[in-house]
């Protein structure tokens, strides 16, 4: 079979059908991690086997030579730590334990890339039921992934994107069936496309998503650079608080060939891990004894800066880390501490502080309350406008995001702006209706991008507001204050309505007369 015979839809349908093994037994929010991890294991096993067969054909029985060459693979698989060995023993008890051992062996053999990736997932967990049920479920899962359609060898599929696309397809489908939890790991693809295109990523850019979820938004930025320049000269950085989602992002990166990434696991506000220096004011360990570092050896630790910062943070997070904000060592809350029960501005201020001084630009998804809530948030908003950091406010349609029907907005900030104004765009009316979710069409995206580029007011769609106008509105950025979308109703022509009414009365009388005639013919007088 040639690579052109491989249909993405077929692979997508097959991996999605593999989820039937879990349905009605395990919650989708739980089994998504098993299915996505098995897809990763199958992929690295197929690549390994494919290359082994190539070397075998080339070098025959020189086992030691083949073994040495396999040590240089992108991922090294220890003996029996692969999908095929697990599949061969699928009818024996202990499938969960064997899969866990294989994953940990693969992690140990590739510790630089996969450290802790499989730490948060256990196929031997009681979440899959008692021992017999668990063994049966995992046997079916191994058989599902052994189907010919999921032969993921490079010699068959030819390109890496097919696997990455299948993984992304699964994440998107899990998001649409996971309710509120979906927002934790996935941004709708057309919204991440919009944000990436707004940022205009360039070759050489360092790009960060401090709440990266599955990493899809980050990868959209990288993909845009590759499509426009053919270059892979860029770096992706991210941080994710939820361990299983962080692991998902790591696997997503590798399956898309994005090896030049650094995704950290931890809470971005309480414990930012993307720092500019590894030097810390902690004691050195010398000959087993701690010793204070000399002052000249200490470097102040600061947040790392990026050309592009994008994020879809959790909306209005209640427990975001308010208690430690006053003493934040990175000075992120110098414009004010956000409210205790709403963390939106905590994420915005973190992102602001991580933009590079000259080239820094950022796009963030926020609930509309960020635009007009008062008190501490109002004061922070005023300062951001006075510092001329806010560039564009885009109101999006409702029901775009998984797990919430509320409309959201995208805020664009830039360290270096062309003017001191803010462009407001009301894009809430441009979308395609969906059964559960609405969608932005390509035309809707392009209209937003063209308007941002033109940076001019557009009747009933966009308005370029001056600092004085925003001050006059007390720095309330609610979009209807700037973009008037009111449509005047056409006047009513009373004479025309009267004429139409008379026509309808005449027609009704004619029909009544006709009906009476029919009834009479049938003997109903």
Image (cartoon, rainbow, N blue to C red):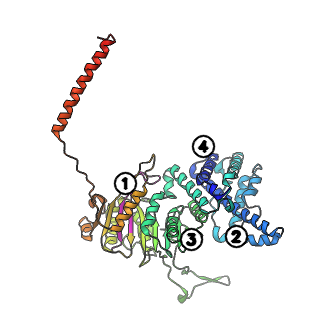
In the image shown, does 311 or 253 lie closer to the viewer?
Answer: 253
Residues packed near mark 3 inside 10 Å, few (<14), some (14 to 19) or many (20 plus) = some
For the C terminus, the image quarter is top left
Q: Position of residue 142 (x, y in %)?
A: 70, 52
For the point 63% across and 54% down, which residue is it? Answer: 5
Residue beneath disc 2: 73
Q: CA distance from mark 2 to mark 1?
A: 48 Å
Q: Quadrant of residue 286?
A: bottom right
Badge nearest the viewer, 3 or 2: 2
Q: Which label's residue is closer to the chain start, 4 or 2?
A: 4
Looking at the image, is mark 3 or mark 4 earlier in the sequence? 4
- Which-is-in-front pick, marks 1 and 4? 1
Q: Is residue 316 visible?
A: yes
Q: Which residue is mark 3?
A: 262
Q: Give coordinates of residue 507: x percent, y percent.
A: 24, 27
The residue mark sitting in front, 4 or 2, is: 2
**Residue at label 1?**
430
Task: State the SS at label 4.
Answer: loop
Give left or right: position of 469 versus 428: left
Give the SS element for disc 2. Answer: loop
Above or below for 252 versus 24: below
Earlier in the chain: of badge 3 and badge 1, it is 3
Ranked by sequence position, the earlier of labels 3 and 2 is: 2
- Position of residue 152 measured from the top left corner of the image (x, y, whole percent): 67, 58
Circles 2 and 1, Cβ within 8 Å, touching? The answer is no
Q: Which residues are magenta?
A: 388-412
Q: Callout 2 environment at 10 Å: few (<14), some (14 to 19), or many (20+)?
A: few
Q: Tell me which label, 1 or 4, sits earlier in the chain.
A: 4
Marks 3 and 2, how far apart in space?
Answer: 20 Å
Mark 4 surroundings: few (<14), some (14-19) or many (≥20) residues within 10 A = few
Does residue 150 belong to the magenta stretch?
Answer: no
């Amino acid at each position: 079979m040639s690579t052109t015979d491989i249909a993405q839809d077929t692979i997508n349908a097959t991996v999605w059908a593999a989820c039937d093994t879990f349905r009605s037994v395990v919650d989708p929010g739980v089994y998504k991690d098993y299915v996505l991890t098995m897809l990763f294991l199958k992929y690295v096993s197929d690549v390994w086997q494919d290359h082994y067969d190539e070397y075998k054909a080339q070098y025959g029985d020189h086992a030691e030579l083949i073994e040495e060459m396999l040590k240089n693979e992108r991922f090294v698989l220890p003996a029996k730590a692969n999908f095929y060995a697990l599949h061969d023993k699928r009818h024996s008890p202990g499938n969960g334990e064997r899969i866990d051992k294989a994953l940990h062996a693969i992690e140990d053999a590739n510790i630089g890339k996969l450290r802790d990736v499989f730490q948060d997932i256990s196929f031997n967990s009681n979440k899959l039921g008692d021992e017999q049920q668990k063994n049966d479920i995992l046997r079916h899962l191994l058989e599902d992934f052994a189907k010919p359609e999921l032969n993921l060898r490079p010699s068959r599929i030819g390109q890496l994107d097919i696997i990455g696309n299948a993984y992304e397809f699964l994440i998107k489908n899990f998001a649409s069936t996971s309710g509120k939890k979906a927002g934790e790991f996935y941004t709708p693809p057309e919204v991440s496309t919009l944000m990436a295109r707004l940022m205009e990523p360039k070759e050489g850019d360092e790009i960060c998503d401090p709440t990266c979820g599955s990493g899809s938004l980050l990868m959209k930025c990288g993909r845009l650079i590759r499509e426009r320049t053919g270059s892979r000269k860029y770096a992706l950085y991210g941080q994710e608080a939820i361990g299983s989602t962080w692991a998902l992002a790591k696997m997503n990166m590798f399956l898309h060939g994005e090896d030049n990434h650094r995704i950290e696991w931890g809470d971005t506000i309480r414990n930012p891990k993307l720092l500019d220096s590894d030097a810390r004011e902690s004691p050195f360990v010398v000959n087993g004894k701690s010793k204070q570092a000399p002052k000249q050896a200490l470097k102040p630790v600061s947040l790392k800066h990026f050309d592009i910062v994008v994020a879809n943070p959790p909306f209005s997070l209640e427990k975001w880390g308010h208690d430690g904000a006053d003493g934040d060592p990175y000075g992120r809350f110098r414009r004010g501490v956000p409210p205790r029960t709403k963390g939106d501005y905590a994420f915005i201020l973190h992102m602001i502080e991580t933009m590079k001084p000259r080239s820094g630009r950022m796009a963030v998804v926020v609930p509309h309350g960020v635009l007009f809530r008062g008190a501490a948030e109002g004061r922070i908003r005023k300062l951001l406008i006075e510092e001329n950091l806010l560039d564009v406010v885009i109101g999006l349609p409702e029901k775009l995001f998984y797990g919430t029907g509320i409309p959201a907005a995208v805020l664009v900030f830039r360290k270096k702006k062309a003017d001191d104004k803010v462009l407001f765009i009301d894009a809430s009316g441009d979308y395609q209706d969906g059964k559960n979710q609405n969608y932005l069409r390509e035309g809707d995206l392009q209209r937003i991008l063209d308007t941002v580029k033109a940076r001019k007011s557009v009747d009933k769609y966009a308005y370029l507001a001056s600092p004085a106008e925003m001050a006059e509105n007390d720095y309330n950025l609610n979009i209807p204050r700037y973009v008037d979308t009111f449509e005047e109703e056409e006047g009513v022509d009373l004479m025309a309505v009267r004429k139409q009414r008379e026509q309808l009365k005449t027609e009704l009388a004619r029909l009544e007369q006709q009906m009476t005639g029919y009834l009479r013919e049938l003997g109903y007088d």
